[in-house]
């Protein structure tokens, strides 16, 4: 019994750190698409779409704009599925619990990595389901991990944003695949290794994660994971004491017990799912997320053609800037907690008279929302300026803004709406924003056609554009 009590804090920290590693190394790998696309081009995927063409001055060149468009379509579909299927996945998570959601996510992720491992240039079409499976499986790993913040009540927003930052930084995994490929290690071996790592995800699912959910506020005596002897009760981290926990009905604290603490005061009525969706908070936050997410997706999908344009098709420079972009993504895990600290800065301070904890949380979120929008504006200005060295700053602003965007989105939903609707609301928010993100493919087609393949549309001549190779 004493060992179980002393092991509670260790278990909480193991869950936190292992979840961070899981998000950092796997969950958001799909957003390292620019690095993987470089390798896939070298391997000849969709190379049959490249054609010989003649420029205005009679020079011959290889036009791979069709190949670029097909790669863009692969990423567009994967990013859409990543967000849109978060809605049914959110219902799955809310109704069937963590274990069911994680087993589905792990299965999809493993299937996606195996499809790429067994694919080759002649079966390029396998990239469509493969990248979508990796994207959907990865977001399920993130969604099931964000509840870990409930174990550390006073730092809840910080942990949620930290996990989202780790999700963004995991795009560096495809950079590692790129570097290994350049070093002679086959793309297929790299993806076989990623598939084998699913064993680690399964072990964590059964040992360090709850079967259902981690409630908030955290009840007294709550426990999760594998049994400890004959009892499941243990003391929780002291950090959670300030979050209004009470005692449970029943057997003293299993994860299957009622998740609401007993209180002598009558709890305020919980808003329904429908009223939450129809609230102005939800609708305006959807607009806020959708516009900035579309900007990021369009930047990622046009990055390779843009670099080819700015470097005049120099493969060495394209590789260098692609590596720089991927490396900056690793900083997402460092940037995201800043947003969480902004949102948690009022914790432990005395609230204004008559102000509820939720109202204090929402007031604290205003600065975070404003800074995120300002970062996106600065990022867009740099990204649309046709100066190659300036793109280093674009990369830095992109990862900063992306980490603030998704971490702030999840944290805002967790504080603005009832916890019992988190999975559904988060899923619906991402699903609706995914519909808007489909505009990236028409935008890419617009760039290819009307803008003559120039994502920056800086007035370069068709002759200079013909010098850029795919």
Image (tube, rainbow, N blue to C red):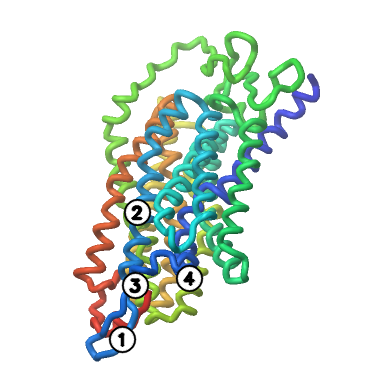
Q: Please tell me how crowded label 4 is: few (under 14), some (14-19), or many (20+) other residues with Cα within 10 Å.
A: few
Label 2 SS: helix
Identify the residue shown where x is 62% and y is 70%: 184
Q: Mark 3 points at which residue?
A: 50
Q: Mark 2 points at which residue?
A: 76
Label 4 SS: helix
Indicate left or right for 391 with 154 as reference: left
Q: Mark 1 points at which residue?
A: 60
Looking at the image, the residue that sits furthest to the right is 2
Identify the residue shown where x is 35% and y is 65%: 302
Q: Residue 277: name its quadrant.
A: top left
Q: Residue 252: name its quadrant.
A: top right
Indicate left or right for 143 with 305 as reference: right
Q: Relative to residue 56, is residue 203 depicted above or below?
A: above
> Residue 396: x, y in percent?
47, 64
Label 3 SS: loop
Of tags 2 and 1, which is closer to the observer? 1
Identify the residue shown where x is 74% and y is 22%: 228
Image quadrant occupied by the N terminus? top right
Q: Residue 449 carries which label?
A: none
Return the disc, 4 or 1, that comes first in the chain's sequence.
4
Question: What separation in Å lies between label 2 and label 4 (alpha carbons)?
Answer: 21 Å
Question: What separation in Å lies between label 2 and label 1 (alpha carbons)?
Answer: 31 Å
Q: Mark 4 points at which residue?
A: 42
Return the disc, 2 or 4, that comes first in the chain's sequence.
4
């Amino acid at each position: 019994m004493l060992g179980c009590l002393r092991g509670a804090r260790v278990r909480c920290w193991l869950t936190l750190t292992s979840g961070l590693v899981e998000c950092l190394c796997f969950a958001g790998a799909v957003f390292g698409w620019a690095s993987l696309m470089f390798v896939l081009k070298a391997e000849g995927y969709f190379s049959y779409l490249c054609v010989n063409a003649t420029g205005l001055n009679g020079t011959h060149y290889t036009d791979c704009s069709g190949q670029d468009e097909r790669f863009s379509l692969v990423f567009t579909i994967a990013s859409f599925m990543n967000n849109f299927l978060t809605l049914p996945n959110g219902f799955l998570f809310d109704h069937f619990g963590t274990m069911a959601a994680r087993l589905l996510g792990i299965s999809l992720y493993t299937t996606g990595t195996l499809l790429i491992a067994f694919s080759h240039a002649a079966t390029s079409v396998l990239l469509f389901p493969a990248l979508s499976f990796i994207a959907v499986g990865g977001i399920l790993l993130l969604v099931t991990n964000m509840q870990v913040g409930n174990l550390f009540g006073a730092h809840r927003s910080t942990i949620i944003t930290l996990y989202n930052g780790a999700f963004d930084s995991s795009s560096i995994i495809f950079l590692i695949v790129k570097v290994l490929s350049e070093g002679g290690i086959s793309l297929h071996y790299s993806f076989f290794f990623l598939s084998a790592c699913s064993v680690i995800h399964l072990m964590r699912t059964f040992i360090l994660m709850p079967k259902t959910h981690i409630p908030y506020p955290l009840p007294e005596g709550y426990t999760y994971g594998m049994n400890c002897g004959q009892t499941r009760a243990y003391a929780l981290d002291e950090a959670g004491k300030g979050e209004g926990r009470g005692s449970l009905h029943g057997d003293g604290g299993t994860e299957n017990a009622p998740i609401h603490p007993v209180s002598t005061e009558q709890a305020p009525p919980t808003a329904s799912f429908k009223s939450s969706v129809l609230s102005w908070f939800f609708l305006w936050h959807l607009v806020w997320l959708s516009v900035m997410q579309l900007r990021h997706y369009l930047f990622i999908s046009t990055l390779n053609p843009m670099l080819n344009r700015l470097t005049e098709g120099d493969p060495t420079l394209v590789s260098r800037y692609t590596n720089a972009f991927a490396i900056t993504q690793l900083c997402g895990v460092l940037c995201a907690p800043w947003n969480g600290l902004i949102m948690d800065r009022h914790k432990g301070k005395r609230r204004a008279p008559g102000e509820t904890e939720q109202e204090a949380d929402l007031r604290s979120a205003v600065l975070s929302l404003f800074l995120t929008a300002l970062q996106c504006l600065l990022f867009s200005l740099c990204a649309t300026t046709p100066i190659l060295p300036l793109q280093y700053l674009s990369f830095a602003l992109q990862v900063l803004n992306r980490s603030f965007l998704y971490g702030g989105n999840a944290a805002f939903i967790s504080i603005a709406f009832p916890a019992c609707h988190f999975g559904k609301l988060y899923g619906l928010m991402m699903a609706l924003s995914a519909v808007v993100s489909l505009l990236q493919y028409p935008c890419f087609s617009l760039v290819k056609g009307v803008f003559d393949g120039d994502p920056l549309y800086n007035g370069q001549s068709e002759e200079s554009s013909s010098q850029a190779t795919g």
